[in-house]
Amino acid sequence: MKKWLENQGMRNTIICAVLIVAGIILQSQGLENVAIPVFIVAFLIGGYYSAKNGIEELIYDKHLNVDVLMILAAIGASVIGYWMEGALLIFIFSLAEAMETMANEKSRNAISELMNLTPDEARRYNDAGEVEVIPTSELKIGDKVQVPRGETIPIDGKLISSNAVINEASVTGESVPVEKVTGEDVVGGTINEGNRIDIEVTVEDSDTLFSKIIRLVDEAQSSPSKTASFIESIEDTYVKVILIGVPLFIAFAYFVLDWGWTESFYRGMVLLTVASPCALVASATPATLSAISNAARNGMIFKGGQTIDNVNALDAIIFDKTGTLTVGEPAVTDVYYLDNVDNTHVDEVIKSAESGSTHPIATAILEYLTETSLIELDNVEDITGKGFLIKHNGSEWKVGKHSYVLTESNIQLTEDVQRVVTEKESTGNTVIFVSRDNELQAFYALEDVVKENAKIAIEKLNNMGIQTIMVTGDNENTGKHIAKQVGIKEVHANKMPDEKSSILDDLKEKYGNVGMVGDGVNDAPALAKASTGFAMGSGTDIAMETADVVLIKDDLTMIPFSIGLSKKMKRIIVANVIFAISVIVLLIVANLFQAINLPIGVIGHEGSTILVILNGLRLLMYRD
């Protein structure tokens, strides 16, 4: 009830209802002269916003809308003495408009929810090194900001403190906190779950990740779907036809049907009411806004209503490999130790040698050997481009790729080991060898692993009958290896960045509407050319700017979700349009047979408007 009262249109509607009830009571007591002014006041209060909107749109935009029809119908009913019916018409119309406004506001709440993720105030260090609380909007690039434990980081920046534990669920969807070290980026809206930290602001408040997301959602909600645009485009013509048709109908009823002037005029006002396209106009917009808001709440941004319209028509989707289907960083997938080797000691030597390196391969090995103890080595030499040369307890260890560890030391692999190494390398694995005094001890297989949600997403798309395709610059064996893991049947490998755009043209001819999913600068041309481009939220800015849809949380399962949501929206809009037109036709026919009066016509017509709005709002609750 509080939300209703906060809406000015709804407050006026409630006041209008109270006055109508009072007028009806006065009428029943025979106080007609007192009741009429009450109905007039109800008329003025309930119809204020409709009249204001209709007149402003007519004067400034030269556009006739349904508000004009309703006001004219109410005035017409009052002119022939139907004061209560005129006021009732205004009340129900006002109620429908207020509910539509509130429905649209509910659909737009996605922006408010996103804005609430970042705090309004920040703790900035002043020149004296003291902390002062200021509005987040006043932060400038280079400012130093303090973020206490458990509080939300107010703006994008760079970590100054030695380390931090950050919960990035609001951005990535991953509930497990990540560890950051000095110099790493932190995102506004994420939560500091470790000790108090200091960050340096790296962007203006208007350029933060969440600011960009909010702008995208806002622009999307301001961009109607194709159906909504079409309905809005015919509204002006439709209203003009009704305004011409009603006087002709009145003349026909009076001169041909011989209904009498009052009855003819009254039936004209009923026609003016029931033929109004209120429900038709409301058939698409609330549904579109609800779908866009639902997507935003789940971490997916559609750049406009037309985009969400297009998604349901996709016949095939192209996926980039690295950073899209895969994590984009190497991870240890297998370790092979030769016979009679002390596995634990090998791991200890490797971890101790790699612990001082920031190379991605070293990072992956260290992550794999988290539980392994560090030991003291006599000497570690980093041989640039090759690996490590280690001295430990009188032995010489080498760690690196094939050419350094095996070729330079002339180490020969057994047939079984060679078979495993060849298999790993042929499927895109990076193999790191470990030798001790020119004898092979072990080797680690590292791979850019598939994202956890990739297989689920591809399976859902395949079940929808959508062709899934991989286009990658890697060799064919690597591409097919990853494709097999996720369920993609068609692979185009060894493709240079400029070839992705040209192969898209070929695939469009083969399949029809083709989507593209990517994350890098090299994906931008294909994203722009695709029927619908999907950009990963962790990707480059240019990919996000070029794409039609942004997956903020890098969750590939949102792609089949978006297609299901789009198809559901289309079904709801089609059902709304058919229902709205059917009600209008039914009420017009009933009026011709004098089977309904003005109050029934108003209830039937505006009731259908409320129903199509509520039907559209169901998309807020859509689940895959």
Image (tube, grey):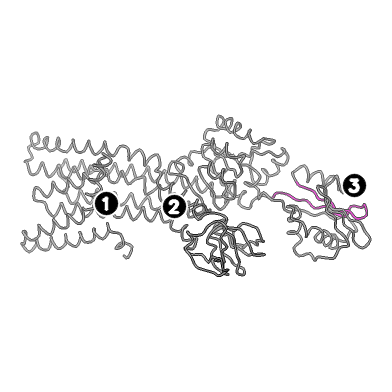
Q: Which residue is mark 1?
A: 607
Q: As displayed, is residue 371 above or below residue 55?
A: below
Q: Position of residue 570 (x, y in %)?
A: 42, 43
Magenta segment's dominant SS is: strand
Left or right: 136, with 424 as reference point: left
Q: Which residue is mark 2?
A: 293
- Residue 267 occupies which quadrant of the picture? top left
Task: Spot the residue most to the front.
Answer: 128
Q: Position of residue 127 (x, y in %)?
A: 56, 66
Residue 173 in view (yes/no): no
Q: Which residue is mark 3?
A: 414
Instruction: State the extent of the magenta-drawn residues as a range.
Output: 429-448
Q: Position of residue 556 (x, y in %)?
A: 57, 49
Q: Secondary structure at mark 3?
A: loop
Residue type at the position of mark 3: Thr
**Residue appearing at x 79%, y 44% in the figure:** 423
Q: Secondary structure at mark 2?
A: helix
**Which comes before the other along the chain, label 3 or label 1?**
3
Residue type at the position of mark 1: Gly
CA–CA distance in space, label 1 to label 2: 25 Å
Q: Position of residue 284 (x, y in %)?
A: 36, 45
Numbered-mark total: 3
**Residue appearing at x 69%, y 41% in the figure:** 479
Image quadrant containing the N terminus: bottom left
Residue type at the position of mark 2: Ser
